[in-house]
Amino acid sequence: MSTAGAERSLVEGAVLGWILDQPPSTARVPVPLLTADEVAVELKRLQARRAMDAAYEAELVMALAGKRPDTDDPPPGHPGARRRGGGSPVPGTSEFLPDELAAPLNCSRSFAAGVLADAHQLVDRMPSVWQACADGALDWHRARIFADVLGSASDDVVAAVVPQLLPGAAKLSAGQLRRRLIAAAIAVDEEFAEQRRQEAERRAGVRAYPTADGMSVLASEMPSAVTAAMWSVIDQAAQLARTAGDDRPIGVLRAEAHAALVLDPAGGAGPAFTGHVTVLAPLPFLRGPGACRTAPEAAPESGPTVNGIPITAAHLRELMAEIGALGVQAPPGGSLAVAITDEYGVLLATATPTELTRLAARGCRVHGREAACECPLLGRPADQAGYDRSAAQERFLRLRDRTCRHPGCSRAAGRTDLDHVVPYDCGGRTSCDNLCCLCRTHHRLKTFARGWRFVLSPDGTLSVTTPSGITRTTRPPGLSERRRQRALPAPAPPPLVDETPPPF
């Protein structure tokens, strides 16, 4: 069968189309009927099937890579060309290939890049290891150990080590296989160990990611000697706190000691740190006159509205009263912002407490301060006539998006670009309905990668379609999906009972 889509026959195309339209198979062995020995056999068969599927996935990944050469990428020296690392791990392919692969895998760009790297190493550089997985003789976890250890080795080292260790790899534990691969590679190339050490040092970094219930992990990868010294200092501080009578778990004490050493290394004499607080205020739940009183069809059509309901002076006064009752204040040296949303979480307006106080005190310009009118006082920042956005728009958009809006990316909005979704040169407006936060990598992807499509809805929902036709959607944090649920039918009335006494 031909490998290129343009060369296959009509019959081949029809058969392939039928196969691709079939749902994933759900055929399973009836587990309750199996004996213990049969369960063990089926589990072993399952591992083989997983290895086969992983090898098939790697083959598909490399097929996509073969269709995305780097000839369409901005060349070196061209405006927008990539300056340093971060491209595709497959030589000769587009730097935007990991982003396209992330869509069907429904994962982040970095995870997709790892999938690409493993597929390239096993399919292209170690085909015998890949074939062992395709035959179900080697699990994918051990195959990835081959790719991880020998990925940076020369072709001569790979050619010498793989035939030596592959026949018995399935019988070794993961740790044993890794150690033997490293030892065999060093025996072939004495410089291999030093190369791995230098590559590991280049991977040094600090990463933060959320876990659950308001907690996060701060992970530092650095040379072992430095890590050991840092751990000793942190543990010593925690043990001193326990000796002083703090009976909380030692892990909590170590975490607090670590934070204190990073945030206040000078013991109060160093630079101060502050915070920035944002108050989210759903407008329909404010109790001011007209808050939810006017039907959307009867609301004024001019000015900013919430589903037809304007943000009035009464809303702002009620909001200021709520903030005052809660005692919310800006941290010392920090800031306090207010974000007004509708019932679905759509951001309607942003303001500082000073701006809210001024608008609430001024009231309506037409009817006066004391009027209980429904004239709008606050809304989205106005559109700009030129290319540059206003400061009010930047504040609104960074508060709405919070992160890069490309699917799978979580770079903070403060380190992103404000991009025109419909390019300004193509008639796109400089408005909050046409601007969103994109990190520099995904801003370049949108600008230079062919076949991608970005669509931004008025509520901030962004839909991204890859060249291969996969669409992923992201919503601003806090934005819920609007769904209309039909009212359930009323229960049937109880049957009538004839309470007339019988004639006897």
Image (spheres, rainbow, N blue to C red):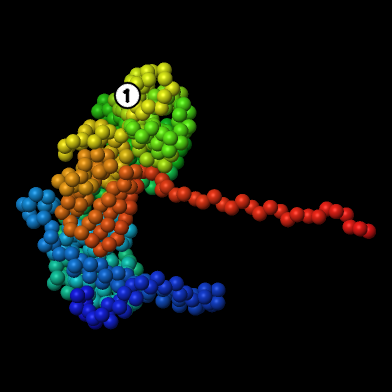
Q: Nearer the viewer, residue 290 or 298?
A: 298
Q: Residue at x 7, y 52 (%)?
A: 78
Residue 120: where, in percent of width, then height? Answer: 21, 67
Query: Is 241 above or below relative to 479?
Result: above
Q: How many marks?
A: 1
Choose top left, top right, bottom left or bottom right for residue 256.
top left
Relative side of 210 to 151, left or right: right
Q: Secondary structure at mark 1?
A: helix
Residue 148: where, in percent of width, then height? Answer: 24, 64
Relative side of 435 to 82, left or right: right
Choose top left, top right, bottom left or bottom right for residue 236.
top left
Q: Nearer the viewer, residue 149 or 380?
A: 380
Q: Nearer the viewer, residue 248 or 434?
A: 434
- Residue bearing the label numbered 1: 355
Q: Residue at x 42, y 47 (%)?
A: 482
Query: Is 140 above or below relative to 38?
Result: above
Q: Taking the image as drawn, is residue 491 in sight? A: yes
Q: Residue at x 8, y 56 (%)?
A: 75
Residue that protrudes farthest toward the left in the picture? 77
Instruction: Look at label 1 and name its amino acid.
Output: Glu
Q: Residue at x 12, y 50 (%)?
A: 80
Choose top left, top right, bottom left or bottom right for residue 399.
top left
Relative side of 67 to 315, left or right: left
Q: Taking the image as drawn, is residue 241 in sight? A: no
